[in-house]
Image: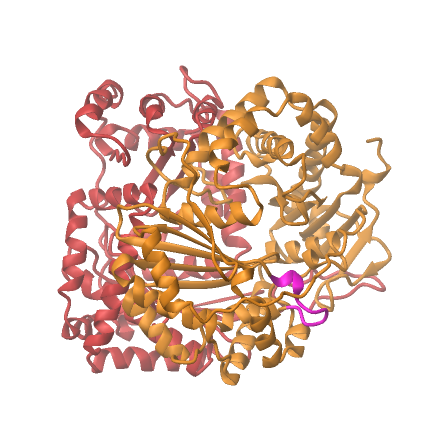
Chain colours: A orange, B red
């Protein structure tokens, strides 16, 4: 009876911050062209820092995918003054958590420290950002570890489906590649590639630094002066993004011994900067982004009991990211669940949302927004995102107005313009015989050299239906 | 519990909360079932009203039951059947607990999910869903003085309920190692060792927490350094101990074996780490590091109202919410000798259940297919 969503919600109990017109933080551009965002939030004796470097795995050289990620992982594996183990011990002794994670568009550095350890934590942060040494043995070990994780992931049908899905949505495009790279691309990477990536992109003029917690503007200024004085700006190379590939309907069925069919359906979507972003956000909330009460959840889970969870999502990034519908159902009900899902989407696209649904979605989005900014971690996480997408630090105050002004007609138009069932890529990882899914005569290996996959492609039947 | 009441029909519960920007969900652990909502404080009255209403009046009908039954079976397929590591954890618990219900998976065995009836569910609800068996935790911008009258108006109107049947099962002492092997398609071998240990109601729980942190906490943990970094025999290595378990639980050490290595070699390396903890006292520096790690993460967890409420609820379930105040002083007082003593007392072979996942075929096996031009099974 108990239900809990697969998609984990960001949770916080309690109160919404008072509705003041004060921006979320104070923005300063430093001499080095680093952007600094500070939210002074006295209370708990802790500080959270979140630094975004505006370069991620998308920029990895062709054939050497995995450089950005490997650089991020190696940053904490040895610096000028600390071996990997000494650094780990020092961080643990302070109770400071330090993470570096490469994404597709950006790399995020996270630091959580007790206020009393601010100075020492910043010293370690500076070591990691400014003076990593990328020792050969650590390079070899971490590369092997990433290869091991890639191998390990293969037992996860959701991961296998997700990998095939992005490869088919984004052939020859950065969004189609694994951030970690793959065994054959990792093998081509040398320590020199890592050093060059670090030297080129870990620059203050490529950085957004956000800090929230028990700290003052003055204090952060003196910490940066003390520890980051040697961080020099440098010109960044140009990178021209390829256009997202043409959408093309296709069906990919991977035959695996699993009890559940893992199903992913979608196509490339929109960029964060798209003028329709907010109409799409609301439209998708009603379709399948809103969890319980959304059309897909109501139909596929609550009415039919096909899936524990189903959701739809527009990943709006710097460039058009994927629109994805994902669900899992027992092999035997895969076809019906897919048909029902497509029927819900088509019907929604034709008929649009109702006034009632629009109002409910707006109410949720507007009223839940303050709950996304309750903790220090929330605020430190949100600040650089606002800067990265050029939304402004007054965004939280403007948000209710932006959402409130979206009309039913705009939502209907967004459904027509941004849902294209006739161009869906549909990936199914399942026991195909039990799922009653046919294999075409021509089979192609589509998984980028992974010969364990037998893929079957055929035109999506959706393409032949009236739409 | 989300299927409606005579007052608030199907879907109303979620709708009323979501319209106010609220989030809601629920989860079940071995000891508790937790329902939660979060939103701006002015909506608290509505939450109290809705939760009290469904505690007393949820409508359990055949249609809703059959649908939820299918959904939970999908949950089990998703989280256990198609996930080799969950499959192994389930096997280890089942082997480690012969008498105590901790041996049962929280989601239930598939056969039980198939045969459970609406009458079973109704009886369960009748017995356990009543204020006499509930702990209400509210964290946020509130005061007890203003809250209590409102709670009396809502939950106060629901009958306290019957006396709850006690769990009388006591796991007998384990006298000899148990080993379970799981053979199924998977990428890499997985190894779990679970040792029976006491819980929060014994002082040893603090030393056990420190031992778990020294072995598996933070970046500098011994298992990470030795097994993952130095010997490169494991891809990951962890130590887990939950001191808030109601009844005696398992202290677990687990490893994902690195490609090309064997679980036998990894077990040997792990055994050396356990021996080291039992023979050498940890240094004051390492002890201090473990304490600092636990204390700082405790502070960080206060950053979220949700975790504050959750933690208070866990300690309240142990008898008194204020037990949480004993945690940091209790951990701070642990000595190196006490860590060695709990390791000597509990981390012994006769007290453990070992689970080993031995991959059988490819990570996810191709389904055998006949006919020309088809690729066969691996």
Residue name at image x 24 percent, y 50 percent: B246
Q: Residue furthest top?
A: B7
Residue name at image x 27 percent, y 54 percent: B298
Quarter of the image for residue A403 reads: top right
* Depicted A323 relative to depicted A162: above or below: above
Indicate the position of residue A216 as horizontal and vertical percent values: 32, 51
Q: Is residue B107 visible?
A: no
Indicate the position of residue A465 as horizontal and vertical percent values: 84, 34
Q: Is residue A140 left or right of residue A274?
A: left
Q: Main secondary structure of the magenta part?
A: loop
Which of the two residues, B128 or A208, is positioned nearer the viewer here? A208
* Depicted B14 relative to depicted A271: above or below: above
Quarter of the image for residue B265 reads: bottom left
* Depicted A431 relative to depicted A391: above or below: below
Which of the two residues, A359 or A158, is positioned nearer the viewer here? A359
Q: Residue furthest front?
A: A31
Q: Is residue B141 left or right of residue A378?
A: left
- Whether A57 is among the magenta residues is yes
* Depicted A161 relative to depicted A69: above or below: above
Q: Is residue A246 visible?
A: yes
- Whether A175 is among the magenta residues is no
Which of the two residues, B121 or B147, is positioned nearer the viewer here? B147
Give the magenta range: A56-65
Indicate the position of residue A423 as horizontal and vertical percent values: 79, 42
Indicate the position of residue B266 as horizontal and vertical percent values: 43, 79
Quarter of the image for residue B210 reads: bottom left
Location of the N terminus of chain B by quadrant is: top left
């Amino acid at each position: 009876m108990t239900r809990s969503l697969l998609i984990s919600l960001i949770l916080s109990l309690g109160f919404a911050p008072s509705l003041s017109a004060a921006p979320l933080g104070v923005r300063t551009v430093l001499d080095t062209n680093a952007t600094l965002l500070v939210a002074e939030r006295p209370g708990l004796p802790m500080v959270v820092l979140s630094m975004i470097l505006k370069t991620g795995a998308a920029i990895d050289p062709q054939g050497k995918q995995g450089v950005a990620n490997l650089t991020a992982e190696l940053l904490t594996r040895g610096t000028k003054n600390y071996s990997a183990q000494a650094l780990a011990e020092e961080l643990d002794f302070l109770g400071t958590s330090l993470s570096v994670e490469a994404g597709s568009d950006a790399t995020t550095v996270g630091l959580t420290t007790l206020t009393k350890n601010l100075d020492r934590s910043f010293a370690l942060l500076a070591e990691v950002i400014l003076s990593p040494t990328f020792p050969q043995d650590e390079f070899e070990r971490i590369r092997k570890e990433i290869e091991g994780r890639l191998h390990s992931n293969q037992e996860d049908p959701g991961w296998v489906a997700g990998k095939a899905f992005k490869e088919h949505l984004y052939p020859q495009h950065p969004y189609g590649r694994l951030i970690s790279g793959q065994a054959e691309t990792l093998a081509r990477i040398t320590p020199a590639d890592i050093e060059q990536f670090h030297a080129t992109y870990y620059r203050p003029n490529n950085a957004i630094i956000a800090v929230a917690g028990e700290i003052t503007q003055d204090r952060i200024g003196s910490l940066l002066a003390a520890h980051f004085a040697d961080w020099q700006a440098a010109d960044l190379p140009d990178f021209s993004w390829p256009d997202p590939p043409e959408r093309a309907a296709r069906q990919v069925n991977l035959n695996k011994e699993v009890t559940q069919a893992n199903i992913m359906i979608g196509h490339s979507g929109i960029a964060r900067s798209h003028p329709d972003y907010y109409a799409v956000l609301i439209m998708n909330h009603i379709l399948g982004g809103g969890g319980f009460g959304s059309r897909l959840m109501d139909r596929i889970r609550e009415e039919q009991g096909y899936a524990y969870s189903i959701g739809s999502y527009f990943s709006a990034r710097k460039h058009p990211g994927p629109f994805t519908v994902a669900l899992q159902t027992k092999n035997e009900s895969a076809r019906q669940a897919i048909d029902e899902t497509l029927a819900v989407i088509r019907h929604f696209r034709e008929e649009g949302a109702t006034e009632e649904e629009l109002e409910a979605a707006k109410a949720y989005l507007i009223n839940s927004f303050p709950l996304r900014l309750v903790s220090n971690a929330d605020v430190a996480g949100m600040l650089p995102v606002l800067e990265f997408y050029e939304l402004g630090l007054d965004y939280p105050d403007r948000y209710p107005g932006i959402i409130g002004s979206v009309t039913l007609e705009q939502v209907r138009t967004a459904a027509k313009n941004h849902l294209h069932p006739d161009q869906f890529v549909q990936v199914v990882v399942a026991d195909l015989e039990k799922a009653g899914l046919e294999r075409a005569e021509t089979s192609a290996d589509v998984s980028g050299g992974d010969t364990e996959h037998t893929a079957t492609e055929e035109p999506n039947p959706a393409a032949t239906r009236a739409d | 519990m989300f299927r409606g009441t005579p007052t608030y029909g199907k879907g109303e519960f979620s709708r009323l909360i979501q319209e106010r920007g609220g989030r809601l969900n629920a989860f079940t652990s071995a000891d508790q079932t937790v329902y939660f909502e979060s939103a701006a404080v002015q909506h608290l009255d509505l939450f109290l009203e809705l939760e009290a209403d469904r505690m007393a009046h949820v409508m359990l009908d055949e249609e809703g039951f059959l649908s939820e039954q299918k959904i939970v079976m999908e949950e089990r397929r998703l989280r256990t059947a198609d996930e080799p590591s969950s499959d192994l954890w389930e096997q280890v618990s089942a082997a480690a607990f012969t008498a105590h219900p901790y041996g049962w998976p929280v989601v239930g065995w598939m056969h039980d999910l198939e045969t459970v009836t609406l009458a079973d569910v109704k009886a369960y609800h009748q017995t356990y869903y009543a204020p006499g068996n509930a702990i209400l935790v509210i964290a946020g911008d509130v005061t007890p003085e203003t809250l209590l009258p409102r709670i009396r108006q809502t939950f106060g109107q629901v009958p306290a309920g019957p006396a709850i049947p006690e769990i009388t099962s006591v796991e007998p002492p384990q006298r000899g190692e148990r080993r379970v092997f799981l053979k199924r398609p998977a990428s890499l071998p997985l190894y779990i060792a679970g040792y029976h240990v006491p819980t929060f109601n014994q002082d040893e729980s603090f030393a056990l927490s420190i031992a778990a942190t020294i072995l598996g906490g933070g970046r500098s943990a011994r298992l990470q350094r030795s097994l993952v970094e130095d010997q490169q025999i494991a891809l990951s290595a962890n130590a887990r101990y939950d001191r808030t378990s109601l009844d005696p639980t398992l202290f677990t050490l687990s490893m994902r074996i690195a490609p090309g290595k064997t679980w036998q070699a990894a077990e040997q390396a792990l055994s050396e780490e356990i021996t080291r903890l039992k023979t050498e006292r940890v240094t004051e520096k390492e002890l201090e590091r473990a304490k600092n790690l636990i204390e700082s993460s405790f502070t960080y967890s206060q950053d979220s109202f949700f975790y504050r409420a959750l933690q208070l609820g866990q300690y309240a379930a142990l008898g008194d919410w204020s037990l949480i105040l004993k945690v940091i002083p209790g951990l701070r007082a642990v000595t190196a000798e006490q860590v060695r003593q709990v390791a000597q007392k509990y981390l012994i072979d006769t007290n453990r259940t070992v689970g080993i996942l031995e991959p059988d075929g490819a990570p996810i096996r191709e389904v055998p297919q006949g006919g020309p031009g088809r690729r066969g099974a691996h």
